[in-house]
């Protein structure tokens, strides 16, 4: 089976794990949040890895950098929603801190990848 270039990226692997973690954590949210925070957090968590993958398929470095910017932005969207979740006591302090640490690592790597594409 062929392994695509994005599948070799540590940042993509971390983003996949963050999406899985987001799905599991949001399973514990109140059911009335199904079409609110749960849906938004799941969508943007998936968007991070999806945009990294899509960006690697683009032909120009400018396009690749653009998709890394979208992935970066989705990461911050997820952080914002995580902060709101913490304020509403939907997630524990430990889960909040773990997601923040994951996002810090992911955004640093996305930023480095974006800069690589912009400077190549």
Image: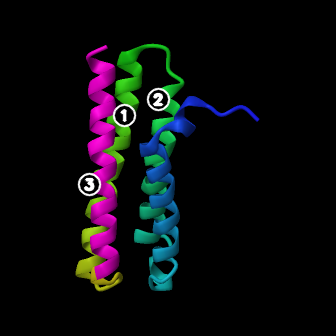
| Residue in view at x 27 percent, y 82 percent | 93
**Residue 67, percent from left and from top:** 40, 31
Q: Residue sitting at 62 percent across and 31 percent down?
A: 4
Disc 1: CA contacts within 10 A as few (<14), some (14-19) or many (>=20)? many
Does 80 lie within the magenta span?
no
Q: Quadrant of the N terminus?
A: top right
Look at the picture and state if 66 lies above or below 85: above
The answer to whether the residue labelled 1 contacts the one labelled 2, judged by CB atoms less than 8 Å apart, is yes
Q: Along the line of sight, which residue is nearer the eye, 95 or 71? A: 95
Q: Specify the color scheme.
A: rainbow
- Residue 95: image location, x then y, percent: 35, 76
Could you give the CA–CA distance between mark 1 and mark 3, rounded to whole angstroms? 15 Å
> Which element carries disc 2, helix, strand or loop?
helix
Residue 36 visible somewhere in the drawing:
no
Total marks placed: 3
The residue that disc 2 covers is: 55
Q: Name the residue at the right extreme.
A: 1
**Distance Cα–Cα, label 3 vs label 2:** 20 Å
Q: Which part of the image, by quadrant, shows the C terminus?
A: top left
Secondary structure predominantly adopted by residues drawn in magenta: helix
Q: State yes or no: discs 1 and 3 in contact (Cβ < 8 Å).
A: no
Res. 104 mark: 3
Mark 2 surroundings: few (<14), some (14-19) or many (≥20) residues within 10 A: many
Residue 19: image x %, image y %? 49, 59
Q: Secondary structure at mark 1?
A: helix
Q: Which mark is residue 68?
A: 1
Give the Cα separation between the discs numbered 1 and 2: 7 Å
Badge 3 or badge 2: first in the primary sequence: 2
The magenta stretch is: 94-120
Q: Is residue 69 above or below residue 28?
A: above
Q: Residue at x 42, y 63 (%)?
A: 41
Question: Closer to the camera, 79 or 18?
Answer: 18
């Amino acid at each position: 089976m062929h392994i695509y270039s994005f599948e070799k990226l540590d940042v993509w692997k971390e983003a996949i794990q963050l999406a899985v973690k987001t799905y599991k954590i949001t399973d514990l949210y109140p059911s009335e949040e199904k079409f609110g925070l749960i849906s938004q957090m799941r969508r943007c968590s998936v968007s991070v890895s999806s945009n990294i993958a899509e960006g690697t398929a683009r032909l120009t470095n400018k396009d690749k950098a653009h998709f890394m910017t979208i992935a970066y932005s989705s990461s911050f969207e997820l952080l914002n929603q995580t902060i709101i979740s913490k304020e509403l006591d939907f997630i524990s302090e430990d889960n909040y801190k773990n997601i923040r640490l994951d996002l810090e690592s992911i955004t640093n790597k996305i930023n480095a990848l974006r800069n690589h594409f912009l400077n190549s």
